[in-house]
Amino acid sequence: MLRPCGIKGQKRKKREERYDKEEDEVEAEEQSIEKAKRAMVEEKEMAMETSGKEEEELEGQTHEMAGIPIVPSDLKTKKPGLIFVLERASLEVAKVGKALLSILDSPVNKAGRLRAVYVKTDKGVLFEVKPHVRIPRTYKRFAGIMLQLLQKLSITAVGKREKLLRVIKNPVTQYLPVNSRKIGFSYSSEKLVKMNKYVAAVSDDVDIVFVVGAMAHGKIDCDYIDDFIAISGYPLSAAWCISRICEAVADKWDVL
């Protein structure tokens, strides 16, 4: 009597977890992660709004996570610096991750001229990213970092107690230099400029704060912005907008 033979199915190809894979390839993963994040973000917001805890209590909650090393840079410079604020971030990992990499990988940051990066989610949670943090390149690793940040409120450097990412109190304006120039970006702005010329005209004695929308659609609406400009006649992604900004600032400050 013949024994029945099982029919082997075709093996699935192992999916690459590249950081730069297209959004339609990661939509299913993002949706599941987004649901968990949304629930945690809402819980954090409620806790931060209803409780009278001070920032010291938040800073006491830390989480050390392997793979978050520090990138060497010239942090002792006394020259005017650059600050980025990513507004209305939906925490769609591919979008936010690419925007952060555009900032942190720039020569301006490596030259020690980046002061800080602040990200404000569309739910109102504000967190700080230190300039010398090394963001993971893989999609799943970065998603895990964001999830841990919302759970633990901060992530420390490997082998140290320095907080490289941490949830902080609103508003973001309390962390911005008093004499800084705050510039917002929107495709809908009537003030279309060439970025190199615009940045060159900014005083060399002040820090520059660039406020960029990190959402898929719509525009930022911030009352603390000094000027509102467009740098292209076409809609740009946050990452591409940031790349243009960093190039213009590098030219202004002779960073090669």
Image (spheres, grey):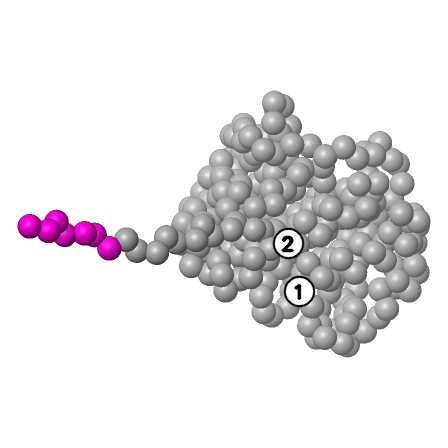
Q: Residues within 10 Å of mark 1 (few under 14, many from 20)?
A: some
Q: In the image, is residue 5 part of the stretch drawn in magenta?
A: yes
Q: Of label 1 and label 2, which has the lower sequence position?
A: 2
- Choose between 207 and 19: the one closer to the eye: 19
Disc number placed over residue 147 in the picture, else none = none
Which percent across, then down, holds residue 192? 81, 73
Amino acid on which the number 1 mark rests in the picture:
Ser
- Choose between 246 and 118: the one closer to the eye: 246
Per the image, the residue denoted by label 2 is 98
Which percent across, then down, holds residue 115? 77, 42
Per the image, the residue denoted by label 1 is 237
Q: Main secondary structure of the magenta part?
A: loop
Amino acid on which the number 2 mark rests in the picture:
Lys
Which percent across, then down, holds residue 47? 45, 42
Looking at the image, residue 66 lies above or below residue 151:
above
Q: Is residue 242 visible?
A: yes
Q: CA distance from mark 1 to mark 2?
A: 10 Å
User: Which residue is at 46% across, 56% downward?
Assistant: 30
